[in-house]
Image: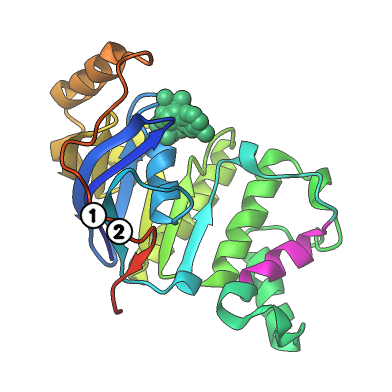
Amino acid sequence: MVTLDGLTVSYRRHPALHHISGHFAPGSLTAVVGPNGSGKSTLLKSVMGLLPFSGGRVAVSAPRARMAYLPQLAEIDRGFPIDVRDCVLLGCWPAEGAWGGVRGDRLARVDAALHAVGLEGFERRPIGSLSSGQLQRMLFARLLVQDAELILLDEPFNAMDSKTTSALLAMIRQWHQRRRTVIAVLHDDAQVRQHFPRTLLLAREVVAWGPTAQVMTEANLARARRMAEAWDEDADICQVDQPQPQLPLWQKVAA
Ligand SMILES: Nc1ncnc2c1ncn2[C@@H]1O[C@H](COP(=O)(O)OP(=O)(O)OP(=O)(O)O)[C@@H](O)[C@H]1O
């Protein structure tokens, strides 16, 4: 579904991700973990094609319209004047286009999704009036409507209470059962061990990537911490080892 081949991404030529290679298989459910600043959000943004690479490439076998990305809540503009129903309706756009009109079947899908996340009665509420947990539920409803093949989630349970977390975890399980590919950035080791069969442990480079039990060992976690602590933000600017050919920012492989 997603193949990373020597992916290197830098901010002002300091690498946030360094020579990342590996594969997220179709239908896999993977947690991306690592210390603060280890490149997890940068990885998701790179897969979505939101950042230029300084080396390597990302190949995605899903069409752009079948990819969904949930950024961290802090990156969402809650002041945007839109109500809950219209915001969830936006989930229809990637696949069906903006000019398809608001048909009854689309509204029925939106209402079903709001029901699934426990937000009936919130349809006409401005998104700025929602609590963080309600906003996250609404964003999951939008993902439900979008019905993407590849779903990227950046800290989806951050600041959520246990009831909301359980509800959202159940939705992720359903996506996994339906063979969607899910990649989620997480900080809760216990949650990762319990719910995510595969894990990518990052410290700007790959520390370990594979079945969760083999990746989340004390030795690997300690190594990731050491690598993060040893990182020098003022180190010399990175030269990507091999000169890279000019590669497209976004490269798709036929589905
Ligand atoms: N827009 C930016 N400009 C400059 N540096 C950035 C930018 N975004 C991220 N970085 C740096 O890149 C590194 C990786 O950041 P990233 O947000 O990907 O890490 P993360 O693992 O998601 O962190 P966290 O767990 O704290 O959310 C950090 O050192 C960060 O300061």
Name the residue beneath numbered marker 1: 245
Which is more toward the observer, 213 or 91? 91
Circle 2 Cα neighbour tier, 10 Å, few/some/many (<14 / 14–19 / ≥20):
few
Taking the image as shown, residue 44 lies to the left or right of residue 239, namely right
Q: Amino acid at mark 1?
A: Pro
Disc 2 secondary structure class? loop
Q: What span is in magenta?
A: 82-91
Give the mark count.
2
Is residue 222 found inside the magenta-colored segment of the image?
no
**Cβ atoms at labels 2 and 1 below 8 Å apart:** yes
Q: Under 8 Å from ligand 1: the CB of mark 2?
A: no
Quadrant containing the C terminus in the rendered view: bottom left
Ligand 1: give its quadrant.
top left
- Local crowd at mark 1 within 10 Å, few (<14), some, or many (≥20)? few
| Residue 211 to residue 149: above or below | above
- Spatial CA distance of label 2 from label 1 is 6 Å
